[in-house]
Amino acid sequence: MGNKDNAGLKKIADLLNQPDSTYSIFEDQIDINVQKEFYEYLESLTPSIKQEENNSLDEIDLLYSKDSSEEEKKKILVLLANLNEVKAYRAIERYTKEGDKNLRKWSVVALQQSRMMLESSLLDEKSVFISTGLGGKGNKLRYFCVFFTHNQEELQTDKQNTLRKEIEFAFNKEKAELETLEFTKGIVIFKALIPIKTDLKELFDTIITEINNYGKLLKDNIIITNVKSLTISEINKILNTESEE
């Protein structure tokens, strides 16, 4: 975790601590590039195109038409998502279940946007929707995490069990959840659901310190991301880049 990551998390924490704001975490794991493309499309709508929003409810059937192109369907979903209408939300919800599979990710992001519009209107307060590539659950974000053993040591079963217990102990105190844990080639890979207001640096520093009380098992450098799951080759590339620096 770098200074930029910590600064970003602090901004989110400051926003969530505002008394007049509520937040929801997007649970689906959707490619961050799809999310970016959707919201860039939404922001690019000119006033003349936005006028079409009022007509978009009449175009719902076009989502299922073989004559409608993929781009036309994307546009309809964006327009529907920007409407403060329950009917629009239900139409998008149905399309995510019954529509084109190749547009499912796009429609899921549209559903998120529509939900946010409705919640902001109904609650009459700031509604913050937090979305990452790995999604989350409840008040928790999902993270992909990597620890490195010293000298790429393969941990024996007893040390693996010790590591698991220390992670679970620290997570229980923070009400975090360990979802997966695997050991491969001197690398410890796991996914976890962690409450959004948790101080990640403090949490993982504590875990590494406690584990290393049993012997110098882990290096201090770690990888934590909520953008996507990394492959072994991607992890090694990051590790090699840091070594060169």
Image (cartoon, grey):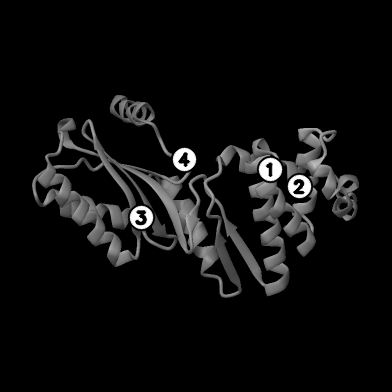
Task: Tell me the element at label 3.
Answer: helix
Q: Are circles 2 and 1 on residues that touch, CB within 8 Å? A: yes
The mark found on residue 60 in the picture is none
The picture places residue 172, in percent across and down from the top left corner, at: 28, 64
Mark in front: 4 vs 3: 4
Q: Which residue is at 89% across, 55% downward?
A: 54
Mark 4 element type: loop
Q: Position of residue 222 (x, y in %)?
A: 30, 42
Query: What crowding class fits label 4: few (fewer than 14 Cα within 10 Å), some (14-19), or many (20 or more)?
Result: some
Q: Position of residue 207 (x, y in %)?
A: 23, 54
Quadrant of the drawing holding the N terminus? top left
Amino acid type at image mark 3: Leu
At 56% from the left and 75% from the top, the residue drawn is 19
Question: Which residue lies at the image location 61% right of the left edge and 74% below the top edge?
Answer: 20
Image marks 1 and 4: residues in contact by CB distance under 8 Å: no
Q: CA distance from mark 4 to mark 2?
A: 24 Å
Left or right relative to 211: residue 232: right
Classify mark 2: residues with Cα within 10 Å, few (<14), some (14-19) or many (20+). many
Residue 38's disc number? 1
Question: In this orientation, which residue lies closer to the viewer: 55 or 126?
Answer: 55
Residue pointed to by mark 2: 78
Estimate how packed mark 1 is, as few (under 14), some (14 to 19) or many (20 or more) residues with alpha carbons within 10 Å: many
Of residues 41 and 159, which is closer to you in this image?
Answer: 159
Q: Where is residue 8 shown, x and y percent of the image?
A: 49, 52
Q: Would you identify the image quadrant in which residue 168 lies?
A: bottom left
- For label 3, the residue is 200
Residue under pointer 4: 228
